Image: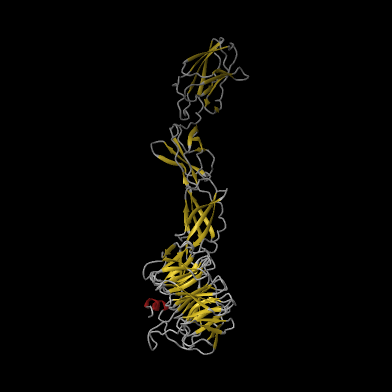
Amino acid sequence: MISRRRNSILGGLTASVVWVGLGVYAPPAMADPPGTIQEFSINDSAVPPPDPDGIALGPDGNIWFTEKNANRIGKMTPAGVVTEYTANLSPGAEPFIIAAGPDGNLWFTETKGNRIGKITTSGTITEYTAAGWTPGNGPDDPGPDDPGVELWGITAGPDGNMWFTEASGDKVGRITPAGVITEFPVTAGADPLGITLGSDNHLWFTEASLDQIGRMSQTGVLTNEYSAGMATDDPVAIATGQDGNMWFVYLHGHKIGRITPTGTINEFSNGLTPLAGPRRITAGPDGSMYFTESGANKIGRINPEGKILEFSGLTDNPAGLRGIITGPDGNLWFSEASAHKIGQLTTPTAPGQTTGVNGTPGNAQVSLSWTAPTSNGGALITGYKIEVNDGTSWTTAVDDPGNATTTRTITGLTNGTQYKFRVSAINGIGTGSASPASADITPYTVPGKTTNVTGEPGDSQVTLSWTAPPANGSPITGYTIEVKADGTWTTAVANTGSPATSRVVTGLSNGTQYRFRVTAINLAGPGTVSDDSALITPLAVPDAPTNVTGVAGDAQVQLSWTAPAFNGGNPISGYRIDVSSGGAWTTAIANTGGTATSTFAGTQNTTANPIGADWFTHDGVNPWNAPGAGTTPWSTTVTLEYTTAPEVAQPFPKIRLAPADPL
């Protein structure tokens, strides 16, 4: 009695028709962008329509496939020319799984005819049967429902023979190139379906009804059976991966399984569409496994680590996805039984090269942006890898496969250090090639705190100087200078526009006390303001004393004068008095200070001595006042009298006095 679980696996394709003769059909030229699905109708005008199921790469470099319900064998060349063969194929055979043999022919199972078929690359079909094999009788056929041995999977073995499974017969069989068949029993009720040559040179097969994976030696000894999945998960197809493991699909468990040569099983479903219905599986050219999803109408890919990626884009839904192989062009080829098509998935790759990496520096960070690759490799770009080079070597700053935005801020950098960056795109296949390196980018922030603000007063101005702060990655381009006289800070200079650490601040009021503070500026903006300077009072040059007169006495002169009307913004604290006997001027009194009188000695009576006064300032000697007429003292001393000025810690004037006529 036929297994109803197995009938659902077959997909209910039970009609039996005959196509007589040979048909040739050429589809449009095929394109090959990575990860793109192309579909090619086989022969829409055929009756019954083609329903490609099993698929294999022939030794002639062509794609060979079975048309199970249409009862034909098809071939598609790399150029897209389709040829269909029916001659010598028994009516109602229902050719199913097909595989290339070591003898240069294609071998296939006949699920309903219960024969092993062989087709040469020129299209000649031969059928083989064994004792006790009779054609199956399906639900739509007259008579009892009996599938017979129900031949299923087939694969090339390690011994030069072809090995196959008998689903209802619970056996694994072997057929030699000459057509000699030998059968080996497995556990009753196992329902063996898919079969593959393992990396250990044993035959590995699925046992759908027992949810197990079986292992058989090339001598036909059943060595192991490993539990796989839960009841009704239905492991069906199996294939050997480049990683040395055997991978299989759970049609109704909706997951992918992996079994190691030692029997360890892992199952994967993360990333798989719910109710995906994975049906067949094959090793891809990139080290991953590819499978058809008859429920989700997609092609799936699982890498050796178990990461699943799906590809959609089929025209028909459902397309009736069945077999899948790696073709002669390195792409994936698959059959669409319901859509009457052969499909091609151009093997996806890692993304192309990212370009246009630019960055905006910040405080110990750089905000990067870039242009996504023009090619995503046929799979959605899911993230980016960012590398940084500080002048010594490249290191990974970000490896983020889950963020596909084309901007990212890289933190933890050192201000003032030049960095280069490069970016690589990531998709479900892998990481693409790195972009060209960015230009040098130097993180920076605002300058530090300016220090040591001092000033020298002048006439309505102060000459400031200070110590530059740390630039923090960006050169200082200028300084802001603020001034305060009445408790309110105002901007004296918004930006000096120069990194120089001195500046004359003008427009001040002489005699007014000021404080100053300075802030450095770079590309990031103004830094930390300095501490306040000490009080600084701008000074001007006092006017010259006036009305200098002298009264001659015995070897002395009694002087008097009028203090300057303008004292330069600071009280006069003293005078300097010089004398001349007609020649060079000499200082009589360096600083009168607060003394009311002073005796000038060494002057001879009858000598006319012009006596004058001038004053000092903190930055030099001011011009003399005009000297008076000569005065002849009566004795060897001169007494000088003047008005005392208060003693303060300020520059003092120097007065040059010219005495009146001699007495």
Colour setup of the view: secondary structure
Residue 84: where, in percent of width, then height? 53, 85
Reply above or below: 27 against 650. below
Q: Nearer the viewer, residue 125 or 490?
A: 125
- Residue 438, x across and y down, in percent: 55, 55
Q: Is residue 559 above or below residue 255?
A: above
Q: Is residue 62 visible?
A: yes
Q: Quadrant of the C terminus?
A: top right
Q: Position of residue 172 (x, y in %)?
A: 47, 74
* Image vertical order of residue 346 relative to residue 66, above or below: above
| The one of 314 and 421 positioned closer to us in this rendering | 314
Of 178 and 157, the residue lying toward us: 178
Q: Is residue 312 visible?
A: no
The answer to which image quadrant residue 486 occupies is top left
Image point (60%, 13%), residue name:
607
Residue at the extreme right = 583
Count of marks, rendered view = 0
Quarter assignment of residue 160: bottom right
User: Closer to the camera, 617 or 224?
Assistant: 224
Q: Quadrant of the N terminus?
A: bottom left
Where residue 428 appears, as percent x and y from the top left, is 48, 64
